[in-house]
Image (cartoon, coloured by chain):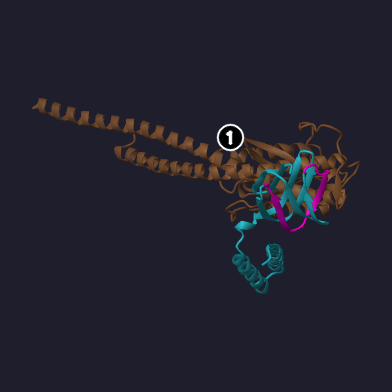
Amino acid sequence: MAAFHFELVSPEKHLFSGEVESVVAPGADGQFTVLKDHAPVMTTLKAGVVTVSGGEGKVEKLFVRGGFADVNASGFTILAEQAIPLSEIDVAKVDADIRNAREDISDAKSDEARLAASDKLAQLQELRAAIGG
Amino acid sequence: MPSLKDLRNRISSVKATQKITKAMQMVAAAKLRRAQSAAEAARPYAERMESVLANLASGVTAGGPALLAGNGKDETHLLVVATAERGLCGAFNSSIVRLAREHIARLQDQGKTVKILCVGKKGFEQLRRQYERNIIEVIELRGVKQMGFDTADEIGKKIIRMFEEGDFDVATLFFSRFKSVIAQIPTAQQLIPAQIPSNENAPPVEGPQASYEYEPGQDEILSTLLPRNISVQVFRALLENAASEQGARMSAMDNATRNAGDMIKKQTTIYNRSRQAMITKELIEIISGAEAL
């Protein structure tokens, strides 16, 4: 299978750059797969898992939350708001964080703090849903 | 003529100062390395963002969202002045403030209204003397240890909210671009309306350009991308600033350490000379006293 260039960057880090065979990304209108010579597309992303197949059975999975995907002749670029390789996510820790966030919501004294905590909880739940299990 | 004790005190106090500046220099060097790699890590994202935005904007015919095209007015200017939280870093803060000041003076000459949003305490302290009434808000970064995207995002959202409420028409961001440890360039960058980099230096794509497909739609993407772009620009400015600050502090403290060294050498020479003069004087007194007998 032919390879093309793929990059995944978040504001804080350059997470992935290299030749890959296929990438599955969670587009705003549904999942889509990009192979070589894909037609130029630009789309927003929702929270989900990006699956990168680098050939020879090498598969890398990364969780992304929000961002943009840009497919053009020179390759495929994802600008993620936040991106974490699944291998670095600890399920038990996420569960603990969710519990903490729930407590934060009930403990919050001001509306602002409550809003911040519930935002955080929503984000964590997205992450939890994405990694499953 | 200062007494020997005075000289000794002066030397020891300069020595103590030198130890402090030396320590500050080393701390700044360590922090610089971290800040620099953070700034470099953020660069690809900002660059990609720019090229995507340029791509999108080139397809927009006349008008477009207010964040891109402006709201058609040019009356009230918001200056976001990003400086450090601490001093003792050479001309770092003052050079940013000077650039902002020149900008303010020019705008006021043209009869425009100027509003200032200070990010970082030092800029506020310097601008307060002259433009207290123009400063609408101060955001302190004291509690922020490692500059995260969240901090920048908050500032970005605040700017956008103010823009939507019609508080200003044009926003410009002032920060210091990190070029090298000894060179930091104070920079003014227009945030709103967004400045779209020209796409000329992009590599030309061979063959007929296929037209983009947009999901959901071009306008929807643009309307999420533009606010995001502002946060990204702010984030980049803050990171560049952080690296510049440490770089400036490092070279300032290096200078201070060297100056202290020079001063110690000079004072020690004076100290030795007057000590010897005193000994000689005493000897002469003894000898001439003995001769008189």
- Residue at 50 percent across and 44 percent down: it is B30
In the displayed structure image, the side of residue B262 where residue B231 appears, left or right: right
- Residue at 78 percent across and 39 percent down: it is B107
Q: Can residue B134 be seen by looking at this rendering?
A: no
Q: Residue furthest left?
A: B293
Q: How many marks?
A: 1
The residue segment tinted magenta is: A36-55
Colour seen for chain B = brown
Question: Which image quadrant: the N terminus of chain B?
Answer: top left
Question: Which chain appears cyan?
Answer: A
Q: Which residue is mark 1?
A: B180
Quarter of the image where one finds residue A20:
top right
Instruction: Find residue B203 and report its horizontal and vertical position in percent.
Output: 76, 32
The amino acid marked with disc number 1 is Ser
The reply to whether the magenta stretch includes residue B131 is: no
B164 in relation to A7, above or below? below
Pointer 1 chain:
B
Residue sitting nearer the eye, B29 or B15 = B29
